[in-house]
Amino acid sequence: MVDMAEVMKKFDIHEIANNELAEIEKTVDAELVARYKDKRGKKIFPVIYAARDNVCGACNMELPKSVLSRLKGGEVIECDQCGRLLYIAK
């Protein structure tokens, strides 16, 4: 038998998370939000990773110097190998 209280609790948590994401979206560049949602729709999880030691934090592919330069300039880049969005942590 299905415990409806547990089902409703899951819906409440989902609604809270969606509300929090909506608030965060207001503070992030719309183009970046669109890219993020596209990745989520393609079931790429986690979507965002930090680049570290000149490699993608998700798949460990070595990043070209031109990509590293763009990341250091503050851009969010898509990994050519795994498709995740990359940034450099400050």
Image: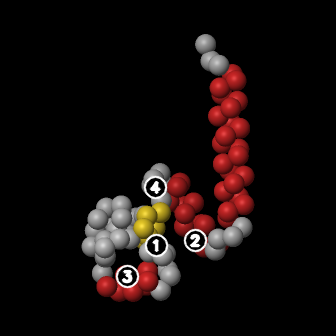
Q: Which residue is mark 4?
A: 46
Q: x, y percentage for residue 77?
A: 45, 75
Q: Which residue is mark 2?
A: 32
| Residue type at numbered disc 1 | Ala
* CA distance separating discs 3 and 2: 17 Å
| Residue type at numbered disc 4 | Pro
**Residue positioned 37% across, 82% down in the render:** 68
In the image, is 26 to the left or to the right of 70?
right
* CA distance separating discs 4 and 2: 15 Å
**Residue positioned 66% across, 48% down in the render:** 17
* CA distance separating discs 4 and 1: 16 Å
Of 44 and 55, which appears nearest the observer?
55
For numbered disc 1, what is the local secondary structure?
loop
| Residue type at numbered disc 3 | Val
| Residue type at numbered disc 2 | Leu
Q: Which residue is mark 1?
A: 89
Residue 45 drawn above or below residue 15:
below
